[in-house]
Image (cartoon, helix red, strand yellow):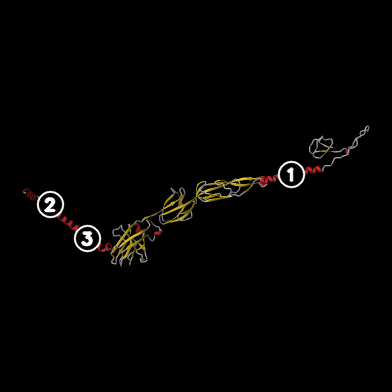
Amino acid sequence: MKKQRALLQTNPTRATINSRRKQLRVQQDGAHHRSFLRRLVVICAIFIALFLTVPNVHAGASTSISDLQYPTTVVLGASKYAEGVPVAFTVAWTEAESGDALIVGIFDWGKQDWPLVEGSKDGPPACIAALKEAACALPDLPRSGSERFKLLVTPYAVAHSALAVFAQLEDRYGNYRSFDWTPITIRQVTTALVKISAPTGVPVTVDGTTEESIAGTVWENLRPGTHTISVPDIVAMDNSTRLRFDHWSDDATGASRLVTLEDDTQLEALYVRQYLLTVAGPYGNAAGGGWYDQGSTATFSVVAIQPMSGLFGLLGGKYVFSNWAGDSTSTALTAAVLMNGPKTVTAQWRADNTLPYVILGAIIAFMTIALLLTIRRSSAQRPAPPTSTPPAPSAGTALQTIPDTLVPAKFCRRCGAKIPRDTEYCEECGTRLGSRSRE
């Protein structure tokens, strides 16, 4: 003890510091206790205020938000959102008391004071005044019911806010009795995403730039406004199969069209597959060949008779249809086939020479008869030879010279022509005389 006292007497500064530390420690402990008491008092006051101002906890009043509809993506500059981005929803309430009012709106829950966002409303008839904020008050409520609301939020508020839809019941003194809220997310972009679907291999042209569809889809990011989108009318798959444009998914019928973009858009170019029907044949004008839609029924035909060419054609020769061959074996002049793929039909013919043969036979028979009649007529006009002969000379009588005029003439036995006596062949038909000639 003597040593400690001696040290304190020799070093008074150290003792003073230690004493000060003790005092500061006591003061800090007292401040902590007072701060805790203040916080406890504040928390109790909050609970008491909530108990006094929220009677729905014990009165059964309630509000609920349902059927919430709004665009999840908004394109900056789109004219359809010039007046505001629509947010529609239904609010139902129960156990409302006389003098209660329904307050609905959209607020920014990302800010500390939860302010109402800019916009206007389009609600039930009892709530008709347009407000700067996207909110609406519906007074004089029945005990229970529901209403449909549509609030318009300015694009500026959409771009800079964390939005939420709220609905609450308030009594005549402004105290709320029930409360419900639902957050909403609206994304704001500078371009619209356009999805264009078409069969694989079909080129799609957007504002003059052509791109072939990959796996049947073309994606484009386009600014709001009017754009030109087109696809081919006909796309050949091979020599006998092709695609024919029919219409767009939104019922537009032109292969080239103008599209006004206000939001993300999906379009589909709808095509019909077609198959080629080939109608062939060596004769005649077969009809019905061409392109037909898949699953349709194609009709084809041919003329029954086709004249021959050349002499037989002049004499009435013709080709007569027999039957079809290929993808149809019908014997009818007009037939049909189901176009479930490329088809080929060929007309079969048979020659009909009956009339030429009859005419030629008649001509030959006529010429034969005419020749026979001519020969018979020539034989009837030939002069008959003399039947008397001069008397034979008697014995001892000198032979006398007989004049040529008294000698009977020679005639060809075959053709009847007169022949000089000193010739051996007929000058008309060339027949050798002799035993066959007659005098």
In the rendered image of this protein, does residue 61 appear above or below residue 195?
Answer: below
Across and down, in percent, residue 284 comes to 61, 48
Which amino acid type is marked by label 1?
Answer: Met
- Residue underneath mark 1: 367
Indicate which disc residue 75 carries: none
Which amino acid type is marked by label 3?
Answer: Cys
**Left of 117 or right of it: where is 225?**
right
Residue at the top extreme, as displayed: 396
Mark-to-mark CA distance, 3 and 2: 40 Å
Picture quadrant where residue 416 is located: top right
In the rendered image of this protein, does residue 200 appear above or below residue 386?
Answer: below
**Left of 376 or right of it: where is 339?**
left
- Circles 3 and 2: CB distance less than 8 Å? no
Mark-to-mark CA distance, 1 and 2: 166 Å
Picture quadrant where residue 261 is located: bottom left
In the rendered image of this protein, does residue 44 appear above or below residue 213?
Answer: below
Across and down, in percent, residue 153 comes to 36, 60
Residue nearest the viewer, comparing 338 with 156: 338
- Residue underneath mark 2: 18
Across and down, in percent, residue 40 comes to 20, 59
Q: Give the SS element for disc 1.
A: helix
- Residue underneath mark 3: 44
Which amino acid type is marked by label 2?
Answer: Asn
